[in-house]
Image (cartoon, grey):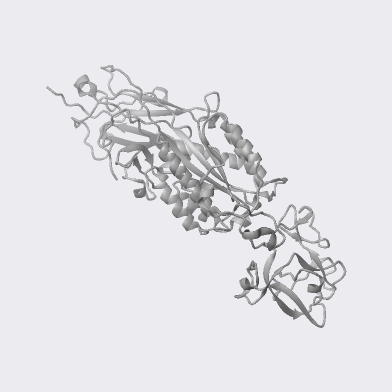
Amino acid sequence: MREAFRCLVRRVAVTYGSPGASGVGRERFTLRRTSATKRHRQRPLVTSLGAGGLASLLAALSCSSSESSSSDTEGAHTVSPESGQGFVVGASDLPGTTPGAPDTGGCLGETRQAEAIELDMFVMLDLSGSMLDRLPAAPSTTKWDAVRGSLESFVRAPETAGIGIGLQYFPQANSGVPFACNSNADCGSGGPCTSSLCVSRGQRPDPDGGGTLDFLRTSDASGTLCASDADCGASGGSCRTLLGACVFPAGASSANPNAHFANVSDTPATSIAPALCEAQADCEGVPGSRCETVGLCSLAPVQCTPSVGCRPGTGDCSPFPYTCADYASCDIARYSAPAIAISDAESQTDAVIASLRAQQPVGATPTGPALAGALEHARVWAEDHPGRQVVTVLATDGFPTVCEPLELPDLAALASTAAEAPRPVRTFVIGVFGDADLGADGQARLDTLARAGGSERAIVVNTAGDVARDVLDALNGIRSTAVSCDFQLDPAVELDFERVNLQVTDADGATTPVASVGDRAACATEDGWYYVRDAAGVPLQLSVCPATCERLERERARADLQIGCVTRIR
């Protein structure tokens, strides 16, 4: 005669290790049974719960009513406080259940050993020219120096062992197009050169006295690049290659005795517009000035000439970095092909470091195709490696400047599609910004992208701080978060997917049931969990919603699986 069994709930308790030989955040998992009267054969339980370390694979508890008797229901609501881990939850602790009511479909579980979930990270790293900007707190160090050092430390860390790392950079160059130029001829099909502008003649009263100034300036405020006069039709100007500006040497102007650029702005009190020149003849209409080649201060984005030197602390006057406009490739395929393929081999550390040290920042910021390529590469990798969790990391020091899409909502749509795919790929965003570059809404704009990619918020590193330390902290945080919110299901163990529940226990021991929401799209901004399924609808892994993931990480909370009771659905 078949006997009825109460639904016995097993709790998996997690203890997080401290830094040491075992690594940061290594979990210890113990399974507590409610019955003390019968001992069963044990098998390893593979599970992955909590935040702060390498997560683990999740498997099921197999069931056998023939091995049990009604005595197994004793103690179903007891507390076992050994080592602070022994709190046992019964079926009555979940909403919608009746205390003491039997569950004839319940089961007695067996223990399976915990294993670490495997993580792969594909890093898309900004290599634009602005990465060479000097850091305010360390003028001898560039943003690139700091970010490169952080990545080197990250891949060397023992805690990163076993994690697959892949790498690509942006921008990628269009084939045959040089970066630097002085004229359109230098660029070939990749022109125009940024030294070639649509210009027109202008006039305004001479501020130093009688007469009228006559000069060349850009035809519009944006400074339209051109390859010929035909490109300037809308502005009504002509196309000229202009490498210089009209400058008043020291003592040449009564209004300003110091060497300075001739300002021909219509509102000189509030804005600056230089008088441009190709030769001295272009400055004849600005009496007392002379045509000098314009350069750029080496430690700050400040223009200079032989007469108008760089202010103290801004470096030396170097040649201006004119570039070919179509240097940066907008081809997604160029970014989906990795510079360093994803691997967790021991030799990967040396390969990543060698690649980083071979790079030289240059060019603009084609974030759109770079992100699209990174997500495409991660998608293919995830489909080919179903036993691994794959994430992308977009690390940048600026907003998009070239190549569509240029707007953050459009980038967010790319990230959202990847995060909601059958094999989800989350996007993490690291921004390295000064306050002026970030702007008042910069954090919110980057958060939109990160949230769409399933990582809740962007990590913005301020260039006024310790950039190397903060970027390394960001990478470590991504490693921890990425592996603590996605749990692998063991295909070798039969599991009733309709009898799994999850709850969160905070630092004070208070527990909160977390309901299943069906899929990621149903998460919204609330707590929840869902199965990630294959094309046939079979669950492959269990993931928690972004709000729950953030809570686990922020509060160092613990997530507990309850296996054997009917799934609670929101």
Q: Residue at x 53, y 37 (%)?
A: 165
**Relative to residue 278, is residue 517 depicted above or below?**
above
Which of the image's four quarters has the N terminus?
top left
Residue furthest left as drawn: 1
Along the horizontal axis of the image, is 500 left or right of 547?
Answer: left
Q: Residue 479: x percent and y percent?
A: 51, 37
**Relative to residue 199, is residue 19 depicted above or below?**
above
- Front residue of 124 and 180: 180
The answer to whether residue 316 of the structure is visible from this angle is yes
Q: Residue at x 42, y 30 (%)?
A: 56
Along the horizontal axis of the image, is 562 left or right of 362?
Answer: left
How many callouts does the rendering have? 0
- Front residue of 141 and 70: 141
The answer to whether residue 556 of the structure is visible from this angle is no
Q: Residue 322: x percent and y percent?
A: 70, 59
Rendering quarter of residue 110? top left
Q: Residue at x 48, y 34 (%)?
A: 52
Along the horizontal axis of the image, is 454 left or right of 292?
Answer: left
- Front residue of 420 and 52: 420
